[in-house]
Image: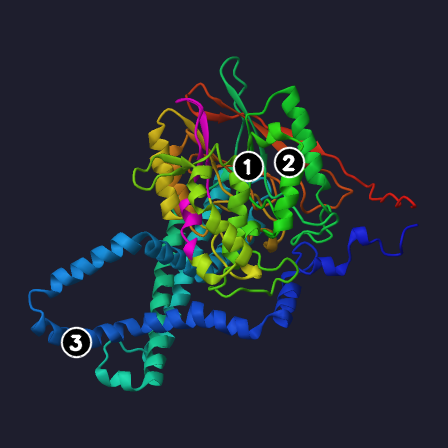
Amino acid sequence: MLPIVDPRQGDVEDDASSTKRRTLISLAGSLLAEISLPKLVAAWVILIVLPALLLGAGPLLASIWISSVSSKAAEIYTGLLAPILLAILIVIGWFGGKPLWRLIEANFWSLNALAVQPAYALSREALRQLAERFLPANVDQRSRDIARAVSAAVAGLLICAASLWIIALAWPGTRWIGSLADLSSPSNLAHIALHNSVVIVAAYLAVAGLVWGLADTIMPQPRDLPRYPPTPATGRIWRVAHLSDIHVVGERFGFRIEGGRSGPRGNERLKQTLEKLDAEHRERPLDIILITGDITDAGRSPEWAEFIDALSPYPHLAALTVILPGNHDLNVVDRANPARLDLPTSPKRRLREMRALSTMASLQGNRVHVVDDATGKLGATLEEFLEPHAEKIAEFSDRGTVRLSWGLAGLWPEAFPMVLPPENDDGIGVILLDSTAETHFSFTNALGLVTQEQTRAIEKVTAQFPNARWILALHHHMVEYPTAAKAMSERIGTALVNGTWFVRRLQRLSGKAIIMHGHRHIDWIGLCGGLVIVSAPSPVMDVTNDRDTYFYLHNLCIGADGNLALLEPERIDLKADNDLTVAAPTPN
C-alpha cells in the first residue's frame, strides 16, 4: 500500500538548498532567516574587519616607525640593524616561508573571489547576454568571439570606473602619514584605517578590473571543438572513462544539495554507472577511470563509505580509478542549511580534507605520486607520503581538536598535485589537481582556485617526461563556455578565480595535454588558448529518476602531427528507473 505522500520521492524540505528547485532570491531569504548572527559577526571580524584595520593602519604605523623609532634604533645599533634584519628575514623564509606564502596567496585570491571576480563576471556576462540579443542567430564564430572580447574589455572599464568613484568618496577620510599622537586615540586611528583600506582595496580593484578585462580581451576566446580527427589505423589508443559530480549521498533515498527533488535519489544511478563501466571494460579494456571531483555531496563519512561500498564489487575497476576533490567534498558546512558557516579557526574543513585523503590513499595511494618539493620531481607515493602521519590523522579524526588540526595544516597542500606517471617515456600520465578555494560558508562553497605552487609543479613534472602526454584533471572549469544562453542565470558559473592566468600558464602544453574537469554538470568539448578542454556531465544530477542520464568514454591517441588527439567520444546512456517500489517486509 502506497502512502499519500511517498517518502522515497522526498518533499519540500529536501529542496532547502536546491538551486534547481528554488530561486537564488528564495535561498537568500532562507539564508538570512537561518544564519547565526554571532558567528557571522565573528567571521566578519576575523576575515574582514581585522585585515582591513591592519591594511589601512599600515601606512600610518610605518610612517610613525620611520619618523621616530627607526631613528632612535639606528643610533644604538648603527652597523648592526641591517644584518639583524637580514637574519630575521632568512629565518622567516627558511622556517615559515612556504606556509606564509600559501596564506598570502590564499588571501589574495580570496579577495579576488570576494570582490573582483563576482563583479567583473556579472558585468561581463550581462554585457554578453545583451550583445547576443542583437546578434543574428546564424552569426559566425568570429563575430561571436569579437562580441565576447569587447564585452570583457567594457566590463573591465566599468569595474575600474566604479572603483575610482569609491576612491573619490573615501579619500577625504584618509591620512597616510601619522604621529605618535595618533596612537593615543584608537577610535580615530580605526576610522582613518578603515578609509585607507577602502582606498587601497578600491585601487587594487581598479587595476585588477583593467587587467582582467585586458587578459580576457586579448586571449583566444573559447570555442567549440570544430571536429574530431579520424581514428588512426595503427598506434596506441587509450580509453578513458571520465566521470564527475557523482555526489554520493549517505542515505538510501537521500537527496542532493543542489538538485533536491530535481535529481535521481539515492545512489542507484551510480551503481548503474559502475555496471556499465564493468560491461565496457570486459568488452574492450579501459585504461583509466577518472572522476574529477564532487565524489560526495558534502564530504561526510557515510558518503565516503557509500562510495567505497559501491566500488568494492569491482576491484578491477578500482585498480584503474583515480579521483580528485571537488568543492562539495571539502567546502559544504551543512547539507541542509546554506546559511551555516564555520569560523576560520574551525577544524571542520581539515576533517573533511583528512576524510578525502584517507579515501584517496586507499584507492590510488600506491599508484599516484606527490611532487618532491626540493627536486621538483616525482617523489613518494601518496601511501608513503601519508604513512608517517597516519597516527596523527587517526587521532585528529577521533578527537577533532584545533591543536591537532594545526599539526596537519601542511599535509593537504603538499599532497597536490598527485601524479599518475606514464607507463613509459612516451605514454600518457594523469596530473590530479586540487582546484577548491578554501571557504567556510555553505552558500559560497563553489569557488575555485589553482595555486601557483601546483602550477609550478605541473611545469616541473611535465619537463621530467618530455616525450609523455598528459591528462590535466581538476574539478572547476577554467573558462565560461561560449554557448549562447537563454537566461542570465545560465551564464554565471563558478569558474576558477584565476582561470585566465592558469590557461596562459598551460599554453606551452598545447598538443601535449588535454584538460578534463567537471563542476558544471554538463558536457562541453572545446578549445581555449590552444588547449583541448573536456567537461564531464554528471550522471546523477539535475534530472529525476524518470529521465535518462549519460557519461562519456574518451579515446585518446597520438595524432599524425605528434600531438595528443581526442577522438570522437562514446556516449554511454543510463536508462531511467521508474520502479521505486519497496519490497514488503517478510512476516516473522
The answer to whether any part of residue 176 appears in the image is: yes
Which is nearer the eye, 49 or 414?
Answer: 414
Which secondary structure lies at badge 2?
helix
Residue type, numbered disc 2: Leu
**x, y percent for residue 453:** 36, 46
Q: Marks 3 and 1, how far apart in space?
A: 58 Å
> Range of the magenta residues?
407-433
Which is nearer the eye, 377 or 145?
Answer: 377
**x, y percent for residue 327:** 54, 51
**x, y percent for residue 413:** 42, 48
Crowd class of label 2 (few under 14; some 14 to 19; many from 20; radius 10 Å): some
**x, y percent for residue 111:** 42, 61
Q: Mark 1 touching mark 2, by CB under 8 A?
A: yes
Crowd class of label 3 (few under 14; some 14 to 19; many from 20; radius 10 Å): few
**Left or right: 386 as drawn, with respect to 233:** left
Q: Which residue is mark 3?
A: 69
Q: Name the image quarter holding residue 293.
A: top right
75 up-or-down from 577: above or below: below
Residue type, numbered disc 3: Val
Q: How is the image coloured?
A: rainbow
Q: Which residue is mark 1?
A: 363
Q: Which label belongs to residue 311?
A: 2
52 up-or-down from 532: above or below: below
